Amino acid sequence: MKKKNIILLCIAIIVVIICVLAVFIGYGSKDKDDPDDDEVEVTEYKDSDDDESVDDESDKATEESGEAIEENSSDETESDADMETEVIMDTDETEGTQETQESSETEKVEEETTKEIESEVATTKPSEPETQKPLDRFSYEYMLIDGKTLYTEYNVKIMQLYESINAERRAAGKKELIFDKNISYVACAMASQAAYKANVDGGGEVMYYDMMKNIGISFTKTVENLAAGQETAKDVVSGVEGSWKTSKKHYNNVLSTDYTRVGVGVDYSESLGYVWVAIFSN
């Protein structure tokens, strides 16, 4: 029994010694392996640094490329803005050119229109003597212009005198006279001449029948009645005093059947008052 115990104890001791040796051997191998591990770790650390440097370089490259892209985009934006400015300037220049062309065309049209109007006015104006001298007061041309002016100015009184003459003819059973506008121009010219000369005796620089012939009025028989100072046409024809009715010669002209037409004229003079003229004609 003692021997078995001694043997077991020895075996146990040997096992313990083996275990201790195994442990020391294991630590020794670990210590040997540690440098490699450190190297691996350092290598791995270096690799990570390299990766980080590579990443940094790639980031820098990316940033540089981004900056380059931004610069390019800014350059492109500036170039686009320049192009837009040029386009706008070209558009403005084009619009300015178009406006200039339109204004020039408008000015040409206005000039042509003005020339046409001036030419029309020039053709409608009465022809003046080549010498540019004023018309003679007693020329046919002057008196005709004067007669037309007075015809317009005193048209109401002219028509009143015409109606008064025909009223007397109707009352006497005579045929009414036809109103003649051209003869009325001559009658107005005669009234103007009498007012100018302050004379109603029938004399003057121009005779009514000569003027009638001059402006192309045809007739075989004509006669003239004059009066001055009366205010109304009725007073001229049938008034109590100084009327044509109170004068046999003048009243016979009013009622005569030898005449079929009549022209009437009126003017005013400060010395004579209203001057009335009637020209009877066939």
Image: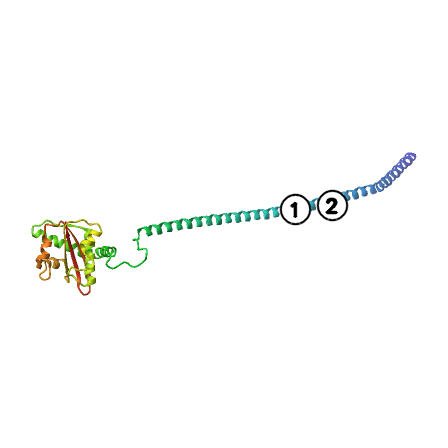
Residue 235's place in the image compared with 180, above or below, is below
Q: In this rendering, would 52 be left or right of 207?
A: right
Residue type at tag 2: Ser
* Residue depicted at x 42% and y 49%: 108
Residue 17's place in the image compared with 100, above or below, is above
Residue at which label 1 appears: 68
| SS for callout 2 | helix
Circle 1 packing at 10 Å, graded few (<14), some (14-19), many (20+), is: few
The answer to whether residue 123 of the structure is visible from this angle is yes
Residue at which label 2 appears: 53
Circle 2 packing at 10 Å, graded few (<14), some (14-19), many (20+), is: few
For the residues marked 1 and 2, what is the alpha-carbon distance in whole angstroms?
22 Å
Quadrant of the rendered image containing residue 269: bottom left
Q: Residue furthest right?
A: 3
Q: In this rendering, would 93 be left or right of 279?
A: right
Residue 113 in picture, x, y percent from top left: 37, 49
The answer to whether residue 156 of the structure is visible from this angle is no
Residue 157 in picture, x, y percent from top left: 17, 57
